[in-house]
Image: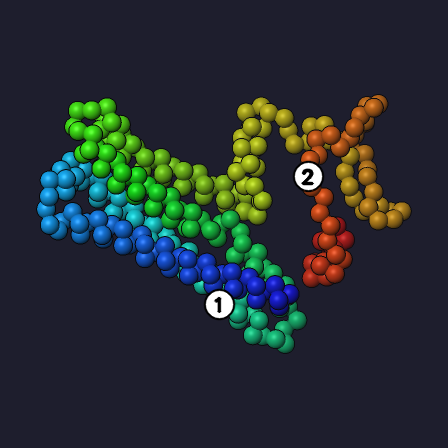
């Protein structure tokens, strides 16, 4: 377990470095653009600033927001890093493996990485604003491209905010799912009248009173029914030693 924790600490350290770089890039981008626009004047700069101040200022706000979100993610990962190092330093504690596992599980949950995803969403929205402003000027004031650029520049930020809140809903409700979006759309499908999860399910696996694990019917099974038809999950094997740190209930399961 100590080796696993060390490997994960190295991973968190690399991610914190990446967060720091992204924060710097997100701050440097609007600073560079604003410095260029407000510095030596030329025709394109004057047109860009006069035609698209909404886009330029909007992009700057989104980039600064993304920098703050990347920094928040870095701080959160640093907290997990510190807690895991603290637990490892208590070498005489009998609860170290369980505590380390909980911190590793928390750091790896989708909910922990929401600021990271929001940071990228804000950064993309910011660069779309810059692109819209440039396209608006280059295409001319009365062209279809300039109209399209104006629509994109005004409505894309709203779409980005809506997506961010939808993602937060999905990542907090399917916090440890391997495929949270797939689970979300599956639930939406069920709410709209799609097949329920238990449809065509006739049996379950559980501990057998005879030996090991058995297959038990949970409803009447029609003749010639292939009872595992809807199951496409991949079987995964683990060593028994890997279960020694689980709770007794989970070990029995």
Q: Nearer the viewer, residue 136 or 207?
A: 136
Q: Is residue 16 above or below residue 230?
A: below
User: On the rendered structure, is 219 left or right of 43?
Assistant: right
The disc at residue 82 is 1
Which residue does the image show at 84% across and 46% down from the upper left?
A: 208
Mark 2, other Cα within 10 Å: few <14 / some 14–19 / many ≥20: few
Which residue does the image show at 56% across and 74% down from the upper left?
A: 89
Secondary element at image label 2:
loop
Quarter holding the N terminus is bottom right
**Residue 221 drawn at (x, y percent):** 81, 27
Q: CA distance from mark 1 to mark 2?
A: 37 Å
Q: Is residue 126 above or below residue 223?
A: below
**Residue 79 drawn at (x, y percent):** 46, 63
Q: Are marks 1 and 2 in contact (CB under 8 Å)?
A: no
- Residue 68 visible, this angle: no
Quadrant in the rendering for residue 71? bottom left
**Residue wearing tag 2:** 233
Q: Nearer the viewer, residue 146 or 246?
A: 146
The disc at residue 203 is none
**Residue 97 drawn at (x, y percent):** 64, 66
Q: Is residue 110 above or below residue 4?
A: above
Quadrant in the rendering for residue 5? bottom right
Quadrant in the rendering for residue 6? bottom right
């Amino acid at each position: 377990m100590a080796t696993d924790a060390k490997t994960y600490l190295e991973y968190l350290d690399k991610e914190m470095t990446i967060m720091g770089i992204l924060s710097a890039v997100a701050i440097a981008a609007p600073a560079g653009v604003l410095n260029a626009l407000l510095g030596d004047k030329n025709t394109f700069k004057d047109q860009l600033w006069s035609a698209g101040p909404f886009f330029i200022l909007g992009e700057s706000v989104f980039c600064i927001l993304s920098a703050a979100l990347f920094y928040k993610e870095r701080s959160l990962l640093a907290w997990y890093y510190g807690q895991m190092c603290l637990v490892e330093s208590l070498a005489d504690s009998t609860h170290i493996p369980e505590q380390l596992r909980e911190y590793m599980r928390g750091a790896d949950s989708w909910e922990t990485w929401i600021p990271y995803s929001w940071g990228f969403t804000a950064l993309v929205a910011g660069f779309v604003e810059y692109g819209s402003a440039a396209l608006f000027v280059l295409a001319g004031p009365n062209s279809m491209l300039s109209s399209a650029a104006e629509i994109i520049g005004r409505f894309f930020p709203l779409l980005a905010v809506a997506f961010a809140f939808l993602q937060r809903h999905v990542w907090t409700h399917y916090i440890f799912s391997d495929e949270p979006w797939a689970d979300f759309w599956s639930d939406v499908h069920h709410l709209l009248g799609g097949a329920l999860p238990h449809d065509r399910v006739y049996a379950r696996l559980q501990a057998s009173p005879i030996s090991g694990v058995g297959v038990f019917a949970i409803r009447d099974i029609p003749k010639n029914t292939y009872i595992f038809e809807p199951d496409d999950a991949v079987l995964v094997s683990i060593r028994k030693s890997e279960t020694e740190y689980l709770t007794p209930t989970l070990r029995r399961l």
